[in-house]
Amino acid sequence: MHNIMGPVKTYKFPLVRSLKGQKTTLRYPLYMDFPLCTTGIIPYGFDSLVFYRRPDTKKPFGTSIPLYEYSVPQGWKVGNVISTGPNNLILASPQANITYDESHSGEVKIRATQKGYLCDGTTSLSAGDWMTITYTRPELKLTVNGATDLKLTCGQSAICNFTVENGNASCITYDWNVGNAGSWLYNGSAAPQIITTTNNTLTLQQVPCAEIPGNVSVALKVNNAVVRTLSVPVSLLMPQLSIAGPTELCNTGNYILENVPCNASVTWSTATNYVNMTPSGNSVTLDRIAPGNIVLKATLLNLCGGNILDVTKNVKVSSPPAVPLLGTITSDGYTKGIEKCNVITGQFSPGKYHCFVSFNAPTIDRVAWTHVGGSSNTANVLLPSSDGKNAEIRIYPGGGSGVWRVSASNACGSTLGNFGFYANVPCPLERIATQADAVNAKSNTTANVPLNGITLMPNPASSQITIAIDINDTGVTSTKNTTKLITGVRIYDVLGRLRKKHRYNRLSSVNVAIDDLASGLYFVEIITGTGSSKRNLNIVR
C-alpha cells in the first residue's frame, strides 16, 4: 500500500462473486495539488482480505484481489501503460502506480475483477462496480483586459492584453491565432496569423479602421502536443457619434457630425417641407421654411469594412410665436366655450369657483401670466404649470371679469396677447353644496335658458341677439313693479373695451344687432332699473 499523507477517503467495493461474501476497501487521498507541468504518483492502497480459498479447487489462496481495471485521464500511466483517454481500460495489479502527467486532469476509475488466477478458464468473468475519484487542476481560461470577451469600437486603436489565466507554466508553449491578421498590430508591425510565445500573455493593438478582427484563440502545447485550445470572442461596435447644433431652429442653423472616423463619407437627410438643407461633407446648414418638428439624419457609409451608421438629432423648427390660441376650458368634465369661465364644479373652496385653462400652441415653450384688468377680488390666476401652458383660474361669486396679459415665448422670441375671462355665476353659492347640485346648476346655464329671469339668445349668434326678462319671475319684476325692466345694454370685448351701447325705456325684451362685430367672445351687460347682470356672448360666422 502506498503511503498516503493527509486526509483520506475510503471506498468498499461491493461483493464480487468469487470472493465468497468478502469485500475489499480502497483508501485514497481526499485532495491533491496538481500544478501544471508537474508529474507524480497518486498514493492509494487496498486493505488486505481475510485468507480465503479458490472456489474451484478449495486450495488456499492469498489475501488480495489479484487484478483491477483502471480508467485514467489521457497521458496518465497505470504501471507502465500510458492511457489514451477515459475509455482506455487498463488491467493491472493493486500495487500498480498511477502517475499523472504535466497537463491533464479528470476522473480516475477503479473496479475489482475476477480476472487472473481467482477462477479457472471455464468460469465466466464478472467485474465489480466502478469507484470514481475526480482530480482537477487550476482552471485554464483566456481573458483579454480582464474580461472573457472583447468589444472593439470602429475608429479606435485599443491596446488588448490577452492572458491565459493559471497557464503560466514552464512546460507549455503558446500558439496564438489572431483571427483576421489585418486587424491587428504586433510589436508595432502588422501581426502574423500565428504568433508563438513561451509565456502566457500576448499584447495586440487594434488597427483603427480595419474590418471585424475575428476571434482570437491560443493552443497550449506540451512536448509539441496540443493539450488545450482556448478562445475569446471579438466583436466590432460602431462609434457613438452625435450631431452638434441647436435643438431649436429659428431661421438658420449650422450642424456638424463630430469625430467622424476613418474618413467615412456622410450624407444628410430630413423632412424638406420644413427646412431647406445645404450639406457640405460632415456639416449641413438648415434654413427654416415652416414651423414643425424634424429628425435630422447623418448616414455614414463604408465604415470599418463597409458598415453603415445612422446618427440622428431631433430639431424643433420654430419662429417667434404668434398670439397664443386658448384651448378648451374644462371644469368638472364639461367642455366650456373658448375664453369663458362659466364654471360650476363640485370642488369649491369657500367663496370661489375654479376653471382650468390649457394653451393649444405647439410652438410655444412657455407662457407667462400678468393680471392687467378686473379686480383681483373678482378673478385671478392660481397654480400655473411650470411652463405656464396650463393654469387654474379662480372666479369669485358675484360674476365679473378678469383680463390677463399672456407672454408666449420660445427660443425665437416672445409675443404678448391679452385674454379675458368672464365669471357667469348661475345661482347663489349657498345653493351649490353638492356635486349633484353643481350638475343641476350647470343645466341652468345652458344657452337660451333663463338665468335669474334673463334670457340671451341665440348664443352663439351671428347677426342679432334677443335679450328678454321674464316678467313672471318674482325675483326680477312683476306687473306692478316695472322698475326692473331693461334700461340699457352694453357689449364689451375681452380686453374690456366698450363696443356697443344702447338705452331703452323699461322694456321686457330687446333686439340688438351684432353683425358689425367680428367673430369672437364678448361680454354683455344688461342694465335694469335696480342694477345690472352680465352674460358672455360668442359671435360665430
Image: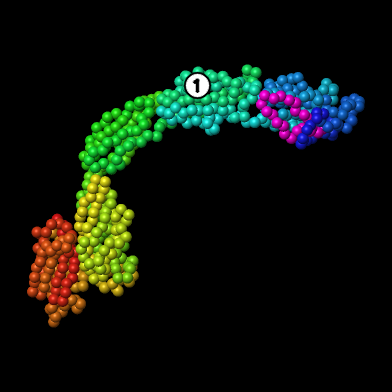
Marks counted in the figure total 1
Viewer-closest of 45 and 222: 222
**Residue at image coords 29%, 66%:** 353
**Residue at image coords 31%, 30%:** 282
Q: In which image quadrant can residue 3 be found?
A: top right
Magenta residues (range): 24-45
Three-letter amino acid code of the residue under disc 1: Tyr
Viewer-closest of 75 and 61: 75
**Residue at image coords 43%, 30%:** 153
Viewer-closest of 382 and 398: 382
Is residue 498 shown left or right of residue 53? left
Q: Is residue 30 magenta?
A: yes
- Per the image, the residue denoted by label 1 is 186
Label 1 crowding class (10 Å Cα cut-off): few <14, some 14-19, many 20+? some
Viewer-closest of 465 and 194: 194
Is residue 410 shown left or right of residue 304? left
Q: Is residue 341 magenta?
A: no
Is residue 497 shown left or right of residue 406? left
**Residue at image coords 18%, 76%:** 476
Q: Is residue 337 visible?
A: no
Above or below: residue 192 compared with residue 405: above
Residue 371 location in percent, x, y?
23, 61
Q: State which quarter of the image contains the N terminus.
A: top right
Q: In which image quadrant can residue 107 be found?
A: top right
